[in-house]
Image (spheres, grey):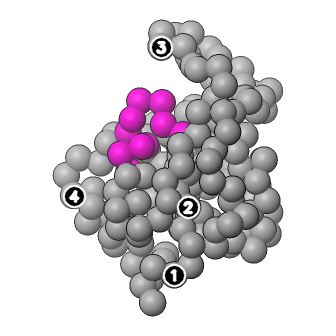
Amino acid sequence: MQGNVLIVCYSYSGKTRRIAEVIQRQTGGRLGRIYPRQPYPSNFERLLTQVKKEIRTRTRPLLLPVDDKADAYDVIFVGTPNWCGTIAPPLASWLSENDLAGKTVLPFFSHCGGEDRGMEQAVRELCPGAKIGSSLYVLENGSGDLQGRISTWLKQNFPKD
């Protein structure tokens, strides 16, 4: 694959992480996980209340440090679950903390059938000056041919040398 590759994701339930791991195996890139300093509640109603408030107020939760710095990479895959139609606040925090201008950013999203109200646009807004590739949307954990879907997406967005 071309250039240095970083794959970063926020995964609440493990579904987005599974997608990131397949991307990592297929690209040979470095995998970095995003964790909020304060974990989200495990109770769904409390989680939903908190997430809706963070999205409405554009709250950016504090994050635990990520080992790799984005500036050392040419291509950055960014992943998140679909939360209330947009990207999860921890990914928004990470994107707002990193200058990705001049880099290629390839977003991927896991969802449970929820409506997309601008997930790709949210990534674009937080990555001014970056080249944003087409997004990969994966229902649930991508059961079926996840590896094949990712391979096809990579060929379209990130061809081999």
Amino acid type of the residue that numbered disc 1 sits on in the rendered structure: Gln
- Residue hosting label 3: 42
Mark 4 in CB contact with mark 2 (< 8 angstroms): no
The magenta span reads 10-19
Q: Which mark is residue 2?
A: 1
Give the percent coordinates (x, y) of residue 134.
Answer: 53, 67
Q: Which mark is residue 145?
A: 4
**If you read the primary sequence from the N terminus, does the residue marked by circle 3 or circle 2 appear first?**
2
Q: Secondary structure at mark 1?
A: loop
Tell me if mark 3 has few (under 14), some (14-19) or many (20+) residues whose alpha carbon lies within 10 angstroms of its own. few
Which residue corresponds to the image point at 58% horizontal and 40% vertical from the top-left? 34
Amino acid type of the residue that numbered disc 3 sits on in the rendered structure: Ser
Q: Is residue 108 above or below residue 131?
A: above
Q: Does the magenta-highlighted stretch encompass residue 15?
A: yes
- Residue hosting label 2: 6
Mark in the foreground, 4 or 2: 2
Residue 86 in view here: no
**If you read the primary sequence from the N terminus, does the residue marked by circle 4 or circle 2 appear first?**
2
Mark in the foreground, 3 or 2: 2
**C-alpha separation, residue under disc 4 versus residue under disc 2:** 23 Å
Mark 2 in CB contact with mark 1 (< 8 angstroms): no
Which residue corresponds to the image point at 70% horizontal and 45% vertical from the top-left? 94
